[in-house]
Image (cartoon, rainbow, N blue to C red):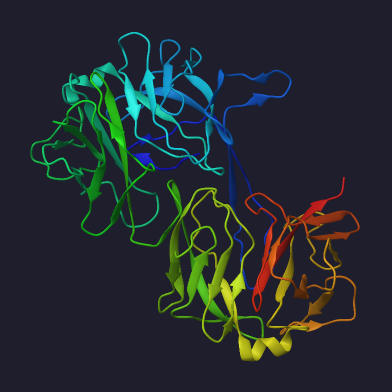
Amino acid sequence: MRRFVLAALPLSVVACSSSSDPPATADTGVDTGSEAAADTGPEVRPDTGPIYPEYTCGPGPYLSMDFSVRGQTIADLGKAPSGPVKVISTACPEVAMLTDAEGYIVIKTTIDKPFSLRFEPPGTTQLPTRWAEQTVRAWSEPPGFTVLEASAKPQLPALDEGAIMVNVSAPSVGSCSAEGVTVTVKDHPEAVVKYHGSSKPYGPDAGLTATSSLGIATISGIAKGTKIEVQGKHPTCDVVTEFEPGGVLVEAGTVSRAALFVRDKYPACGPAPWYLLGGTVYDRMTDGTKGPGILGASVAFDACSGVTATTDKDGKWNVWISAKMPSFRTTSFAGYISAISNELAWGFDYDTWDTALRKADTWKTLMPGWDDTKGYVGVSIAAPTTGPCKDVNGVAITLNGITGAKVVYVDGDPPAATTGTVTTKKGLAYVAGLTPGILPADTFTGAKTGCTYKQKYDIDSGRTKIAAGHYTSVNLYAEATK
């Protein structure tokens, strides 16, 4: 579920959500995290097909957007529509779309193609509402939309030329809030911006020169038919559009919606919505402990070329990353072996995604078969805390579709090769001599009596990135054999 909020009002409304917790990971030098969340849209019953009206908009490939249209006052959720809502998309204006009587709809819309949706509710209790242009990706969460209640009209500019409502939101983490943002319209000095007070009736407050804690501003003075770009500025935080590209069309008799997002000034990877990732980069000690944090290490993500976070004096880093966008993470520092994480698609904020880098001169001699021209993998058993698979020892690891590489089981600190054919109590094995490239999910699998182990689990795609002279972390997640 999208978690950005406009005061008490969520920008998006979805039918339901679910969550699950992966088993704790063993110590491979790259911690994948211990929590996960998976979102779902409205229920689809396999025996009857979708239970909501479903439309296809534009050419494929598609993202299926399952959402419900809800009413909204200035600062709160309002009533459900009194009947089907007419929906018009700029990506397929020829397709006549209607929600069901409760506002639910499924729209299969083209991935990576910008579109804007206009909603025309029945009757007079809700106002025609158009949302800013946005672009969905293959991994995007289904968005949600609201239409303004007619009761909000006294707090809005006159609708004859079109009213613009700007919602400013902030994440639930970090130091930034929706308060104190000045709003402008790019290349339109004639725009009249008014900021709304945080107390009912949430109307424009002439004494405000920036947003209140409510995070609401309205704009008038723009000629109808004009497409504008709404911008924001904050003294200490970044302000970005929550939609991409975010253009807002001004229409007569319509409330046009724009959304801005206030966030701490960390590097950002990918389009909105975002979650905040962070962690610490340590020096890995040969006795298995974490040494001091490393200043100046770089943290980069494959999905965002050129976006790099740099650790501070304590080894800490932070990055805003697109919700559910799969990416490998590479952590590097001069004189150390660069570490590659498994491919994860984050659906929540997480601030302890730590990495302990290995000093090259020390660790290369301790890692059997190390070759600077090949990739090297540490396979770790991620076991649940209870049940028949809770022990990480005794797992036989198989390489599927790989030739010329060998699994070496290790034990102790520093890990040393054993003569065994299964994992020890350390739950770790090394694989050397791997050809650089991307390996498909479940290239590495494991088994022991009563348990099977695979790479793909929840936010982990199971894919593996191999790079010459790098250490790649692979986690095998346990499942009891039925």
Residue 254 point in image, percent of width and height: 27, 21
Residue 311 point in image, percent of width and height: 44, 74
Residue 466 point in image, percent of width and height: 68, 68
Residue found at the very far top of the displayed protein = 123
The picture quadrant where one finds residue 130 is top left
Q: Quadrant of the C terminus?
A: top right
Question: Residue 263 or 332: which is nearer the viewer?
Answer: 332
Q: Residue at x 73, y 55 (%)?
A: 441
Q: Is residue 163 above or below residue 179?
A: above
Q: Is residue 191 above or below residue 440?
A: above
Question: Residue 229 or 312: which is nearer the viewer?
Answer: 229
Q: Is residue 317 left or right of residue 385?
A: left
Residue 303 point in image, percent of width and height: 53, 57
Camera sees residue 95: yes
Question: Residue 176 or 127: which is nearer the viewer?
Answer: 127
Camera sees residue 27: no
Q: Is residue 126 above or below residue 62?
A: above
* Label tally: 0
